[in-house]
Amino acid sequence: MNQPLISAIICTHNRASYLGAAIASLLEQTYAAYEIIVVDNASTDGTRAVVDAYQPHPKLTYFYESTLGLSAARNRGAAIAHGTILAYLDDDAEAAPHWLAALAAAFEQHPKAAIAGGYVSLLWPQDTTPPPWLSSTLSESLGAYDLGATTRLITNPGQTPRGLNYAVKKSFLDSVGGFDPQLGRVGKNLLSNEELHLTQLALAAGHEVLFVPQAQVAHNVAPERLRRGWFLRRSWWQGISECYREQLSHTLTLERVRVRSLCLVRGLVKALRHWPDPAVRFENVVYAYGQLGYVVSGLRHLLPRPRAKACP
């Protein structure tokens, strides 16, 4: 059997301290037919030096993308990739040696699949344990992803694979115009849902989306992400992202905003009800804050803006 060429793509922005481990994990893959593309997304740290330390290597290529934004970097990687399958690995993640082999096998066994992603575990900082206010649900915000021990079809876009362990057929990505730049992270904003949006497009077109447990990746948890403020900020941007996605599909209405307002209140009530439990309490506060982000964004989009008065 001829192995399809896979383009393993790392999009990176100012994470030189993690990038080397990500590259090293790709160089140790058991799969033979692959290339590695590192897209440097306007980094200002030692990113280029990290890549140069692994050069020259026949599988490794470096490209610089000056337009800041995760989707812009992903689309740049896709444009220069030679593979029929694009496998995206985050710059702070480490792939198991059989990662690409598992993804290739899944696409072979499911010809209708357009997207596939795998199991994600968390790597905690040295001498650090999860804080008592971190619930298992909030751990998913750090990248944790596990839908079971067997390959399964994803029919609910909310269960779409994590972007840090994400593979897509190049032909499908090209057909939908790539990742939406309005959804991907740009600098310090935490806009997201670009993977969920692609899952919706894939399912609507009759393609399959897969969870592949054998395609394993470990995600490094940065110390700054173990602060309550990070989770609140991420939830806020999640709400904005969900609102924008509904704007794209023309399903955003004042009724949806009203329902999200009720969800906001319910989240706060649950937080008060479970006040003695720090994990459940904070999880509901974070949830409510995300609903607030949606409501604010929705009202800004739907309500008419007052017109400036004309000068006499």
Image: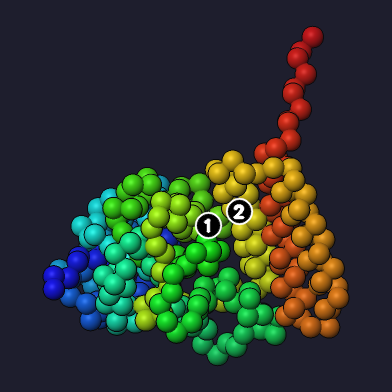
- Percent position of residue 76, x then y: 32, 51
Residue position for label 2:
242
**Which residue lies at the image location 58% right of the left edge and 70% below the top edge?**
141
The residue sitting at the front extreme is 206
Image quadrant in which you'd find residue 47: bottom left
Badge number at residue 239 = none
| Quadrant of the rendering where the C terminus is positioned | top right
- Percent position of residue 44, x then y: 41, 58
Q: Are marks 1 and 2 in contact (CB under 8 Å)?
A: yes
Image quadrant in which you'd find residue 30: bottom left
Which amino acid, by three-letter code, is at mark 1?
A: Asn
Q: Is residue 163 left or right of residue 188?
A: left
Other-residue count near label 1 (Cα within 10 Å), few / some / many at <14 / 14–19 / ≥20:
many
**Which residue lies at the image location 84% right of the left edge and 78% below the top edge?**
275
Q: Is residue 287 left or right of residue 56?
A: right
Of residues 171 and 301, which is closer to you in this image? Answer: 171
Q: Secondary structure at mark 2?
A: helix
When the figure is inspected, residue 207 is found, relative to residue 138, above or below; the finding is: above
Which amino acid, by three-letter code, is at mark 2?
A: Glu
The residue sitting at the bottom extreme is 127
Badge number at residue 193 = 1
Q: Is residue 76 left or right of residue 258?
A: left
